[in-house]
Image (cartoon, helix red, strand yellow):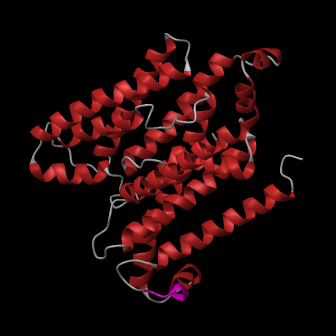
Amino acid sequence: MLFNRKIMVIFVCLFLILVFSILVSLWLGTINISIFDVVCSFIGNDNIDLCKMIFYVRLPRVVMAVMAGAALAVSGCVFQVILKNPLADPFTLGISGGAAFGTAVAVSGLFTITSIFFVPLFALAGAFVSAFIVYMLSSYKNFNSNSMILSGVAVSYIFSSIVMLLYVLAPAGNVHTAVVWLMGSLSYVDIKILPFVSILICAGILFLTFCGNTLNLIVLGGEKCRTVGVNINRTIKIFFIIASVITAVTVSICGIISFVGLMIPHMMRKIVGVNNTVLIPACALCGAIFLLVCDTTARIVVLPIQVPVGVVTSIVGGIFFVFLLVGVERKI
């Protein structure tokens, strides 16, 4: 059976941990409220100010943390599968560099538009441009894993250099907001954008989950795909585009949050195995939990200052890979 008893227990545990993490994240913050008040606010609470704080301040941030964590973890998993490279993730492929470039253009002072959609749209456009360039460069090598990774790194360096130049030329007041965004932050999530982002991310994750068996065929190689009538090159292109889209949408709202797409798939393969039909939803749940816990930690660790969540994920991710490296060397 695909979902045996062990897998079902793991999914139930992940879901319960996610629900608990959501309640804790709604509870903790600069203003102290009880967990009882949090629960009561969902079933009816006469305290209007408390309900406004939970539903208009904390809940949108919690939802975005869940969506972003799930999207980055799933896209990292898909990139690692289609490229057959454990180091592939949304950021080594240059998508984050493109989003950073779009943000730098938006805040450089070249435009005077003040819409809340302005910076996210520019970041999204930059991410798409970066993904397209990497896609075109790697197509000359028939989407070879190494060529795609190297293309992503090269594009990231180019965009990073342009970003630094634009920040030198940009007004000082705009640069601070952009730098915080580049560190990865959920502080600027707008409730008006959230429904669109959530629908797009959920649709992408569901599609990739239902295509888990096709991803399993890609792991087995081109010969197996041809045997069952699957066009491997076209399929890889489709998965690359979908994973790039949900990454680009996430990065355009939350900034550059590193290590989620690289670390979570490694962890979940150890727990649920390599079957992508199970692995992808498991990565979505674990990624949501991980980013939500990191964001909650970032909000309360040095009150009243809110640390960008990307700082926390980088520290945790760096420590994780140090232990991973030590473990690999011991096995050798």
Residue 285 seen in render: yes
- Judging depth in this view, the residue of 19 and 267 nearest the camera is 267
- Judging depth in this view, the residue of 210 and 190 nearest the camera is 210
x and y percentages locating residue 164 in the rendered image: 19, 37
Q: Is residue 36 magenta?
A: yes
Asked if 321 appears above or below 215 in the picture, the reply is below
Q: Quadrant of residue 315?
A: bottom left
Q: Which residues are magenta?
A: 33-37
Q: Quadrant of residue 225?
A: top right
Side of 157 relative to 76 (left or right): left
x and y percentages locating residue 293 in the rendered image: 50, 66
Asked if 310 appears above or below 211 in the picture, the reply is below
Q: Quadrant of residue 249?
A: top left
x and y percentages locating residue 75 in the rendered image: 55, 40
- Quadrant location of the C terminus? top right
**Residue at (55% x, 88% y) in the render:** 36
